[in-house]
Image (cartoon, grey):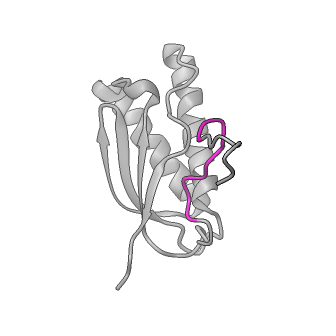
Amino acid sequence: MNPGVQYKTWGKSRSSRLVDYDYSTDRPIYVTICTESKQEIFNSKGNAEIVIEELLKSTQELGFRILCYCLMPDHLHVVLTPGDSGYSLKKFLNIFKGRTTAVFRGREGLNKIWQRSAFDHVIRME
């Protein structure tokens, strides 16, 4: 490292996705999507039902398949696969998070319910 240059880690946009992986490949992906500031938005049955309804709509319309999911008060775990849709995980996240945010904006006045991006793990078939 150059002695006159200070290394900095802030201010850089880092992708949380694998660099050379095609996220439209028909392989199961384990995804965790967290709420903004760990707000416990999904404590109520009504709010939980909205998230699950939008999850099912988004996967159906994009051609994804859900293998399983678990909704917690402040985050969602889901194992899904793009199937033959040709869409990437990024597209799915944009659609799903946008829809749920729109519903909660109208219902509860929340402008941001999700943290940026999501955590994912491509499941090994071996």
Q: Position of residue 88 (x, y in %)?
A: 62, 62
* Residue drawn where x is 62% and y is 72% of the image: 20
Q: Does 48 sit left or right of 27 as displayed?
A: left
Taking depth in this image into account, of 36 and 56 the one nearest to the observer is: 36
- Picture coordinates of residue 63, whole percent (x, y): 57, 64
Q: Say whether residue 101 is magenta.
A: no
Within the image, what quadrant is residue 116 found in?
Answer: top right
> What type of secondary structure mainly makes up the magenta span?
loop
Q: Does 77 sit above or below residue 44?
A: below
Range of the magenta residues? 9-18
Q: Quadrant of the N terminus?
A: bottom right
Residue that extends furthest to the bottom in the rendered view of this protein = 126
User: Residue placed farthest to the top in the image?
Assistant: 109
Residue 44 point in image, percent of width and height: 29, 24
Instruction: From this view, report whether residue 12 is shown above or below residue 38.
Output: below
Residue at position x 44%, y 43% in the image = 33
Snapshot quadrant of residue 122: bottom left
Residue at the front extreme of this rendering:
3
**Residue sitting at 52 percent across and 63 percent down?**
64
**Closest to the observer, 10 or 18:** 10
Q: Is residue 15 highlighted in magenta? A: yes
Please tell me which residue is depicted at 45% across the width and 57% down the height of the picture: 120
From the image, which quarter does the C terminus lie in?
Answer: bottom left
- Residue 42 vs residue 107: left or right? left
* Quadrant position of residue 24: bottom right
- What is the number of callouts on the image? 0
